[in-house]
C-alpha cells in the first residue's frame, strides 16, 4: 500500500520538476555536507551477495541490513512493492553533518516491514541522526503479546539526537490493550513506542533531543497509537531537566486504536499539533481509563490544532474516555489551544490535580457534543490550577454539560478552584447541566440554562452561531461556530493578556473589545443564513419519518424569537422538477396539541419567498405554511394556498419530525439549478399545554408572517450525481491515463490500496453509486461490497485511497463537480481533497491518492455505466 506524500507533475521549471521526480521515486536530496552512499534492498530480485549499491545489484534481506555498518549521509532504500517479515534493527548512527535514512525507491506501493509477531517491526536502539520514512509497517499475530510497530529506545549512553519518523503507514499491530495485564500491561505496547531504560550503575542517563513523529497514518491497531515513556527514576522537578527536548508530534492521523491515541511522558516542552485521533480505544479489551491525547511526567507541553473524536467508553466499568488530559507528575504550564473535540464519551478535558509549579491553560477550543460517561459523570474535570477562556462548549444532543461538582482536592493535598472566562456554554435538548459555584466565572455567555450566580458579568441568550452543531469530522467543518453580526457574544468579553494573539480560525485579537467564545468577529460573516437544496432523482416519500438517504438534516434552527427554548431543531431541503421538499426534526421531551391555533402547539412554520424579492410584505410568490405534531389533517397556509401540498409528521425518539412537499406550481416558479429563493423555518414549542412557551427561527424575525426580508437564502443545487443514476454500477475512469479504479490484485481485504488498471472486465473494477444525501455519494465495490474511502480518515495530501467495510464515516463520502467534457472531480467529504492518480501515473498499478485541487487531468474522472 501507499500512504505517502507523492510528487506532482506540474508546469514548472525543469529544476523543480526534477526534484519532484526524485521525491516521487523516494530518492530525496541529501542534506548539505552529506556525502554518503545509497544502498538498495529488493526482497524478490535481490541477493545478499550483491554489493547493494545500485538498483541492479540490491541486497535481499533484513539480516543483511541489520548486520551492515553505515556512515553519516548513507541512505538505505527498500524497493516499492516489496515486503519483508522480521525486525529491521540497524545499529549505526548518522551525525549532525549527515543523517542515515531508511526509505524507499521506485514507484508503487510502499515497502512493507512486517514484524511477524516479533516484539517490534522496527527497532532503533541507541542510535541517533536517523530518519525512517515512506514505509508500511505491520506486526500482526494470531496471539496477543507485548508488541510495537516501531521501538525507539536508549540506555546508558546520554543524549540521543535527531530521530525522525515520517510518512509511515502503521497498522495491525497486535499488542496488549489490557490495563490489568501482568507483568506488562497496555502501557508497554504502541504503534510507535519511545522509551529509555536505566543503564548500568554509573552510566549516563539516556534522553532524546529533536525527536519528530510527523505525517504518519496509524490505524487499526490493538495498542496505544504513540507513547513516549521513560525510566521510572525521574519523578521530580529537578530531573525534569533530563527529559526529552524538542519532541514534536505533528500531522499524524490516528484511527481505531486499542487504547489511548497519543501519550506524552518525559517530554520537556513537547509540541503536539495538527493531529487527528478518532475512535481511540475501540479495539481494546480492558483499557478503562484512557484518553485520546494526554501527558504525564512531562513539563510545559503544548497541544494545539488537533482534532479528537469518539474516544471509546468501555461499558460497565469506570472510564476516563475524554479527549485531553493532564495527568500525574506534570510540571509547568500545559497549554491546550485551537483544538476541536467532538462526540467523546467521557468529555472534553480532565486533569488529576498533580501539576506542580504551573497551570493548565485551555483557550480557543471548540467542544461539540462531548458527553460525560466519565467516572465523575462530568464533561470537564480539572484538579489543577486552570484557566479556561474563550472556548466554545456546545451540547445539542441531549447529553447536557457538567463541570466537576465539588472543590477538587488534588492528589498532593491542595484544594483548587478553576477560572472560566469568556466562554460560550450552549446547551439544548435536555440533559444534566451543572456549573458548580466553587469555581470562578466571569464574562461567559450561557444559553439554555440559568447562569451560575457568581458570574457578575454573565451574558445570556442565543450566541447566533452561523450554524452551531454542524461540525463533523475535520477541522474544516466547524465554520458554523463563527459568530453572526448581532451576536450578544461580540464585544462582550473581558481583556485577557498573553492570550496567544489569535482566535480559533487565526483572526487577530482583538477586533474592538474582546468577544466571547472561540470566534473573534471580524465582520466577514453575513447575518443572512444560507443553505443549498440538493436535487434528487427519486421523489421523496412524505410520511414524516425522514428516512430517505437523500435527506441531510443538519442545519440548526437556533435563533431565539421568544421564551427560553429547551429543544434542539434541525432541518434540510431538497428539490426536483415537481416539488420543493423540506424536512425538520425537533428533540423535545414535552409535546402538546391542544390549541385552536397551530402556533400555540408544537409545530413547524415553513416560510417561502419564491421570487426572492425580500419584500417587507407578502405577494403572490410568498407563503407561510404550518404543520403540527400529531395532526395528520392539519395544514395551514396564511392565504389558503395549499393546492397540491403534501405533509406529514412522525414521532421519533425524544421528539418529532415533519416533512412537507410544496409543488413549484403552487409557488408560481419553474425551478432550475442555481435558482435562489427565500426560505425560513420556525419551531413553536409548547411545554405545558395552552400557549406556546418559546419560538426558534433559522434566519428571520418574529415578523416573518408579514415581512420576508430576513428570510434565509436557499440555493437549488444541481444534482450531485452528474452522470450518475442512484444504485447503478459504473467503471470509474481516469482522464489522464484512461485506466479504471479497482483494489490491488482484486483483493477483498479492508484497507487495500486502490489502483488503476486497464479494463480487465472484472467486477472488482465496477462500483455502485449510492446517494447518501447532502450532495454526496459512496461507491460500493461490486465484487466485494467494500466502500471507496481515504484510508485512516486522513486529511493529508498524498493519503492513499483504499476500500473498507461501510462504517458511515465521512471519509467514505464523495461529491462530484463538473470539470467539463463529461469529466468530474471527486472530492472527499472529510478532507475536501480530490481523488488523484499519484505522480500523474499512466501505468497499470498506479496508486490512487487524495491531493489538493491543482487542475490536473489526473484528478478528473468519467463514469461508464455497466449493466
Image (spheres, rainbow, N blue to C red):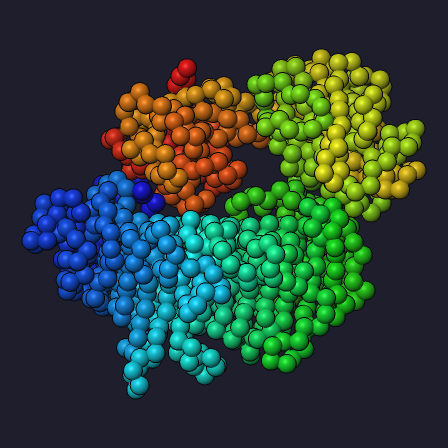
Q: Residue at x 58, y 31 (%)?
A: 774
State the quadrant of the C terminus: top left
Q: At x 21% / y 66%, what residue is drawn?
A: 91
In this picture, residue 157 sits left or right of residue 580: left
Give residue 447's position: percent from left, percent from top. 75, 52
Front position in the image: 743 or 578: 743
Q: Is residue 49 above or below residue 551?
A: below
Asked which quadrant contains residue 17, the reply is top left
| Above or below for 572 versus 329 | above
Residues 781 and 324: in front is: 781
- Residue 311 visible somewhere in the drawing: yes
Instruction: Identify the image quadrant of the N terminus.
Output: top left
Q: Say which residue appears at 51% left-offset and 21% top-offset.
A: 726
User: Residue 704 at x, y = what percent?
Assistant: 81, 31
Q: Is residue 814 above or below residue 252?
A: above
- Whether residue 617 is visible to the viewer of this picture, yes or no, is no
Name the residue at 74% across, 46% down.
429
* Total marks in image: 0
Q: Could you tell me residue 490's position as x and y percent? A: 70, 53
Residue at the outermost bottom position: 202
Residue closest to the eye, 5 or 847: 847
Q: Is residue 497 left or right of residue 8?
A: right
| x and y, in percent, of residue 107 in the image | 24, 41
Amino acid at each position: 500500500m501507499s500512504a505517502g506524500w507523492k510528487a506532482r507533475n506540474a508546469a514548472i521549471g525543469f529544476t523543480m520538476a526534477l526534484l519532484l521526480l526524485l521525491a516521487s521515486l523516494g530518492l530525496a536530496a541529501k542534506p548539505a555536507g552529506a556525502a554518503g552512499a545509497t544502498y538498495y534492498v529488493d526482497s524478490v530480485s535481490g541477493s545478499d551477495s550483491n554489493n547493494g549499491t545500485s538498483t541492479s545489484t540490491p541486497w535481499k534481506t533484513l539480516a543483511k541490513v541489520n548486520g551492515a555498518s553505515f556512515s553519516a549521509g548513507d541512505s538505505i532504500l527498500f524497493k516499492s512493492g516489496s515486503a519483508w517479515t522480521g525486525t529491521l534493527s540497524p545499529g549505526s548512527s548518522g551525525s549532525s553533518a549527515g543523517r542515515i535514512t531508511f526509505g524507499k525507491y521506485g514507484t508503487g506501493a510502499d515497502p512493507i516491514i512486517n514484524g511477524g509477531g516479533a516484539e517490534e517491526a522496527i527497532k532503533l536502539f541507541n542510535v541517533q541522526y536517523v530518519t525512517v520514512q515512506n514505509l508500511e509497517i505491520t506486526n500482526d499475530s494470531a496471539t496477543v503479546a507485548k508488541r510495537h510497530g516501531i521501538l525507539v529506545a536508549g540506555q546508558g549512553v546520554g543524549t540521543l539526537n535527531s530521530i525522525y519518523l515520517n510518512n509511515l503507514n502503521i497498522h495491525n499491530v497486535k499488542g496488549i490493550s489490557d490495563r490489568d495485564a501482568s507483568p506488562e500491561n497496555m502501557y508497554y505496547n504502541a504503534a510507535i513506542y519511545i522509551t529509555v531504560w536505566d543503564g548500568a550503575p554509573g552510566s549516563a542517563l539516556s534522553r532524546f533531543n529533536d525527536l519528530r513523529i510527523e505525517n504518519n497514518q496509524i490505524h487499526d491497531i490493538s495498542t496505544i497509537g504513540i507513547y513516549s515513556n521513560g525510566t521510572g527514576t525521574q519523578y521530580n522537578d529537578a530531573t525534569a531537566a533530563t527529559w526529552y527536548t524538542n519532541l514534536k508530534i505533528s500531522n499524524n492521523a490516528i484511527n481505531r486504536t486499542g487504547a489511548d491515541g497519543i501519550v506524552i511522558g518525559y517530554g520537556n516542552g513537547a509540541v503536539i499539533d495538527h493531529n487527528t485521533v478518532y475512535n481511540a480505544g475501540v479495539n481494546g479489551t480492558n483499557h478503562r481509563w484512557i484518553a485520546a491525547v494526554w501527558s504525564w511526567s512531562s513539563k510545559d507541553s503544548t497541544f494545539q490544532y488537533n482534532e479528537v473524536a469518539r474516544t471509546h467508553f468501555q461499558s460497565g466499568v469506570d472510564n476516563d474516555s475524554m479527549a485531553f488530559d493532564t495527568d500525574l507528575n506534570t510540571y509547568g504550564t500545559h497549554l491546550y489551544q485551537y483544538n476541536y473535540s467532538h462526540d467523546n464519551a467521557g468529555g472534553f478535558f480532565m486533569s488529576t490535580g498533580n501539576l506542580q509549579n504551573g497551570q493548565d491553560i485551555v483557550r480557543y477550543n471548540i467542544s461539540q457534543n462531548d458527553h460525560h460517561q466519565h467516572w465523575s459523570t462530568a464533561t470537564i474535570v480539572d484538579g489543577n490550577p486552570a484557566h479556561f477562556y474563550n472556548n466554545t462548549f456546545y451540547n445539542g444532543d441531549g447529553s447536557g454539560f457538567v463541570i466537576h461538582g465539588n472543590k477538587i482536592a488534588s492528589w498532593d493535598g491542595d484544594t483548587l478552584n478553576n477560572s472560566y472566562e469568556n466562554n460560550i456554554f450552549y446547551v439544548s435538548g435536555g440533559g444534566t447541566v451543572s456549573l458548580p459555584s466553587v469555581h470562578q466565572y466571569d464574562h461567559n455567555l450561557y444559553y439554555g440554562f440559568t447562569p451560575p450566580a457568581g458570574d457578575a458579568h454573565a451574558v445570556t441568550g442565543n450566541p447566533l452561531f452561523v450554524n452551531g452543531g454542524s461540525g463533523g469530522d475535520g477541522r474544516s467543518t466547524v465554520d458554523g461556530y463563527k459568530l453572526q453580526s448581532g451576536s450578544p457574544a461580540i464585544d462582550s468579553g473581558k481583556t485577557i493578556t498573553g492570550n496567544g494573539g489569535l482566535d480559533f480560525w487565526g483572526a487577530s485579537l482583538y477586533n474592538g473589545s474582546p468577544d466571547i467564545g472561540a470566534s473573534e468577529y471580524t465582520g466577514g460573516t453575513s447575518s443572512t443564513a444560507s443553505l443549498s437544496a440538493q436535487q434528487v432523482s427519486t421523489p421523496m416519500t412524505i410520511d414524516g419519518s425522514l428516512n430517505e438517504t437523500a435527506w441531510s438534516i443538519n442545519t440548526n434552527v437556533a435563533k431565539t424569537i421568544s421564551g427560553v427554548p429547551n429543544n434542539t431543531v434541525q432541518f434540510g431541503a431538497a428539490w426536483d422538477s415537481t416539488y420543493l421538499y423540506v424536512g425538520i426534526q425537533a428533540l423535545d421531551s414535552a409535546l402538546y396539541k391542544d390549541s385552536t391555533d397551530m402556533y400555540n402547539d408544537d409545530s413547524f412554520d415553513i416560510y417561502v419567498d419564491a421570487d426572492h424579492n425580500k419584500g417587507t410584505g407578502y405577494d403572490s410568490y410568498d407563503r407561510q405554511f404550518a404543520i403540527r405534531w400529531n395532526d395528520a389533517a392539519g395544514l395551514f397556509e396564511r392565504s389558503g394556498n395549499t393546492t397540491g401540498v403534501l405533509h406529514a409528521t412522525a414521532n421519533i425518539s425524544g421528539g418529532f419530525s415533519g416533512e412537507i412537499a410544496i409543488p413549484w406550481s403552487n409557488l408560481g416558479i419553474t425551478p432550475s439549478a442555481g435558482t435562489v429563493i427565500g426560505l425560513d423555518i420556525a419551531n413553536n414549542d409548547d411545554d405545558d399545554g395552552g400557549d406556546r412557551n418559546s419560538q426558534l427561527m433559522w434566519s428571520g424575525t418574529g415578523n416573518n408572517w408579514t415581512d420576508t426580508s430576513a428570510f434565509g437564502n436557499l440555493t437549488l443545487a444541481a444534482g450531485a450525481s452528474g452522470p450518475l443514476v442512484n444504485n447503478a454500477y459504473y467503471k470509474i475512469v481516469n482522464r489522464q491515463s484512461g485506466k479504471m479504479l479497482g483494489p490491488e490484485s482484486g483483493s477483498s481485504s479492508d484497507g487495500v490500496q486502490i489502483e488503476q488498471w486497464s479494463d480487465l472486465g472484472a467486477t472488482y473494477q465496477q462500483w455502485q453509486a449510492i446517494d447518501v444525501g447532502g450532495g454526496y455519494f459512496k461507491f460500493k465495490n461490486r465484487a466485494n461490497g467494500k466502500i471507496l474511502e481515504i484510508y485512516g480518515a486522513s486529511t493529508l495530501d498524498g493519503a492513499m485511497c483504499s476500500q473498507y467495510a461501510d462504517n458511515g464515516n465521512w471519509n467514505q463520502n464523495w461529491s462530484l463537480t463538473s470539470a467539463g467534457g463529461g469529466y468530474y472531480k471527486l472530492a472527499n467529504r472529510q478532507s475536501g481533497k480530490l481523488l488523484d492518480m499519484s505522480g500523474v501515473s499512466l501505468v497499470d498499478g498506479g496508486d490512487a491518492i487524495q491531493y489538493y485541487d491543482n487542475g490536473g487531468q489526473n484528478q478528473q474522472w468519467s463514469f461508464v455505466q455497466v449493466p
